[in-house]
């Protein structure tokens, strides 16, 4: 029996136009139309297109990596979700019409929340590799899974790291989106528990490209760290302007989230990125290096802090589809619920009853230059942090 949760109400109201077609979608779910495929409504256009392209390349590597073990071929069905909730829902409808038994490949928490709502309504498993907002995975969810940590887990790991580094005061410049707002709320409520004072914060529109007023309002004499939950195309602009304002000389630690550990971000800033911290993945472990070498050989790019989790998400889904020997959505969902997986990203994965990763460990990395190359190098790995 379906649970009539608040999520169902959100799905019915926010996506009424999609729900009106539910009869057509439901008709797609018969065994004769299923394929051994994973649906990926990843952004192939828009501001997240570069990240989406890397995710799809990593997904292909994951499928190839498992091919020798698999009893049959698993393919990827790719659609351009544009990094936009409405566009992602539209192409997801097409994916479900074509019988895919599982979905992954989203980036922003807003898109992942929309896909989670839709997946719960349509009873098809959806896994987010990187989205952290609490509302992506809600109590009572049965078909949504989060491979990474949620915002509470990641922020807890970050403040533990900052506390270990002796940080006593922090300022935040956040984008006005789900994760940015939630990060500020977390620090307002929890920072004092780690002997850290939230000295100042600014939440600014995603379109902002002039951060000088916010930077000049920060009293660097009162802080040891600046945290920047500001993704997308303007994240590098923020960091560049921080350097122009001498923030890196005046503050011990400047830290961002996982997008700050991507190759695209590094390339945008060149050597200026060195010493920028980020939460992310362990690109130095053996499995990560093997996957990165495969991606380098095939696509002439390395795995980074966003593509490697997408590799893991597809690798897990591929494994479950093969082990269950079924493309029935409920079978795939049940296989995910019971999985114990050692990720290439650097932490174990097992899911609690709501679909959060209860084995997550926070990794903090930093860009360093060595032997003529700039690499993202882990500095800290937390103990397991429960959801």
Image: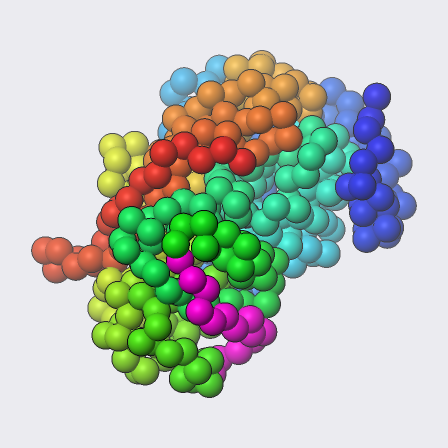
Residue displayed at 63% across by 19% down: 334
The image shows residue 348, relative to residue 378, as above or below, that is above
The image shows residue 26, relative to residue 182, as above or below, that is above
Residue 267 seen in this snapshot: no
Residue displayed at 41% across by 18% down: 69
Which contiguous range is marked in magenta?
A: 196-210
Q: Does the magenta stretch include residue 197?
A: yes
Q: Which quadrant of the figure contains the C terminus?
A: top right
| 298 vs 239, nearest the viewer | 239
Expressed as whole percent of the image width and height from the top left, the position of residue 129 reads 51, 41
Task: Identify the image's colour scheme: rainbow, by chain, secondary structure or one colour.
Answer: rainbow
Instruction: State the residue lying farthest toward the left.
Output: 371
Expressed as whole percent of the image width and height from the top left, the position of residue 36 reads 59, 26
Quarter holding residue 321 = top right
Residue displayed at 77% across by 27% down: 29
Expressed as whole percent of the image width and height from the top left, the position of residue 191 reads 46, 55
Q: Does the magenta stretch include residue 346?
A: no
Quarter holding residue 62 = top left
| 333 vs 297, nearest the viewer | 333
Taking the image as shown, residue 242 lies to the left or right of residue 370, namely right
Quarter holding residue 240 = bottom left
The image shows residue 16, relative to residue 6, as above or below, that is below
């Amino acid at each position: 029996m379906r649970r009539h949760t608040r999520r169902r109400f959100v799905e019915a109201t926010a996506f009424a136009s999609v729900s009106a077609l539910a009869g057509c979608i439901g008709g797609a779910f018969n065994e004769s139309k299923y394929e051994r495929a994973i649906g990926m409504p990843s952004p192939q256009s828009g501001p997240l297109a570069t990240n989406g392209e890397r995710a799809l390349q990593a997904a292909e590597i994951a499928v190839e990596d498992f091919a020798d073990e698999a009893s049959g071929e698993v393919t990827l069905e790719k659609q351009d979700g544009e990094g936009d909730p409405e566009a992602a829902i539209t192409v997801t409808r097409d994916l479900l019409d074509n019988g895919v038994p599982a979905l992954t490949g989203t980036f922003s928490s807003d898109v992942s929340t929309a896909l989670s709502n839709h997946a719960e309504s349509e009873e098809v498993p959806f896994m987010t590799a990187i989205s952290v907002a609490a509302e992506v995975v809600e109590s009572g969810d049965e078909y949504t899974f989060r491979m990474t940590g949620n915002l509470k887990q990641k922020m807890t790991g970050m403040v533990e790291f900052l506390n270990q580094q002796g940080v006593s005061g922090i300022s935040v410049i956040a984008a006005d989106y789900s994760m940015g707002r939630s990060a500020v709320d977390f620090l307002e409520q929890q920072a004092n528990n780690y002997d850290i004072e939230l000295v100042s914060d600014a939440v600014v529109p995603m379109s902002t490209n002039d951060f000088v007023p916010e930077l000049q309002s920060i009293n660097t004499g009162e802080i040891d760290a600046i945290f920047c939950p500001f993704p997308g195309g303007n994240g590098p602009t923020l960091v560049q302007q921080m350097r122009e304002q001498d923030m890196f000389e005046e503050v011990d630690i400047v830290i961002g989230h996982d997008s700050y550990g991507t190759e695209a971000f590094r390339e945008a800033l060149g050597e200026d990125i060195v010493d920028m911290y980020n939460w992310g993945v362990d690109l130095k472990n053996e499995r990560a290096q093997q996957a990165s070498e495969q991606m380098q050989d095939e696509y002439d790019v390395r795995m980074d802090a966003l593509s490697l989790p997408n590799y893991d998400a597809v690798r897990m889904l591929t494994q479950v589809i093969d082990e269950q020997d079924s493309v029935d959505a409920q079978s795939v969902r049940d296989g995910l619920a019971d999985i114990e997986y050692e990720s290439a990203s650097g932490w174990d994965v097992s899911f609690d009853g709501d679909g959060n990763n209860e084995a997550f460990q926070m990794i903090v990395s930093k860009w360093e230059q060595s032997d003529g190359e700039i690499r993202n190098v882990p500095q800290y790995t937390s103990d397991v942090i429960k959801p």
